[in-house]
Amino acid sequence: MKVYRISLLAISVFMVFGFTWFGLGIFSLLQKATAGLLLTLSFPLLFIVYATYLLRKRSQGNGFYWDEEGIVIDLNGNKVYWEEIESIRYMNFRGMKSTVIYPHYTFHEKIRARRNKWMPTTAHSVEWFFIEKPKEFHKNLMKAWEGKQASKSPKI
């Protein structure tokens, strides 16, 4: 089992964006431009806090992986089990590449309850921007998925 950790590039982008925007907000305050004070100083803090959260999750060793039970779909360790999956696809929507896991519709409510969500989700997306070696992740996941499908199909 190989864990695909959170990308340092994603963490760095959020951190740099947050600190740059925060610095520009402080500079504008020093120049007596007080319009949008709350937005100017609080919005960049969201990026800084999110980058810190991702860095903490990375240092804890959290990431995306699969094992004999199923695929981990988020940083909290929630899984979608192999028998619940209908298909796995590569998606490229407006430049945002991701691996999308589609569970069978009969398992949506079960997954919702397991994840403690209000509404069921019809697909679970692993964004490539957030993981290291995303092409390797997708290729190896598809091999594992095809192996599970081959072992599940009836022998003639």
Image: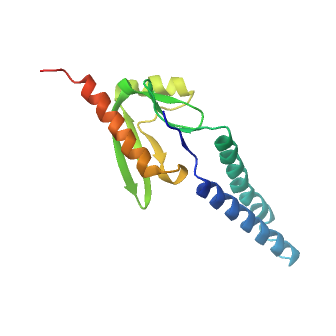
Residue pictured at 42% horizontal, 48% vertical: 136
Residue at the extreme left: 156
Above or below — where is 34 with respect to 143? below
Residue at the extreme front: 1
Above or below — where is 4 with respect to 117? below
Quadrant housing the C terminus = top left
Q: Position of residue 37 (x, y in %)?
A: 80, 65
Colour scheme: rainbow
On the rendered structure, is 102 left or right of 44?
left
Residue pictured at 45% horizontal, 28% vertical: 67
Q: Position of residue 65 (x, y in %)?
A: 49, 36
So how many labels did they put on this image?
0
Report which quarter residue 109 is drawn in.
top left
Above or below — where is 76 with respect to 68? below
Foreground residue among 27 and 14 = 14
On the rendered structure, is 37 left or right of 103?
right
Q: Position of residue 127 (x, y in %)?
A: 48, 49
Residue pictured at 43% horizontal, 54% vertical: 97
Residue pictured at 52% horizontal, 50% vertical: 132
Q: Position of residue 5 (x, y in %)?
A: 57, 44
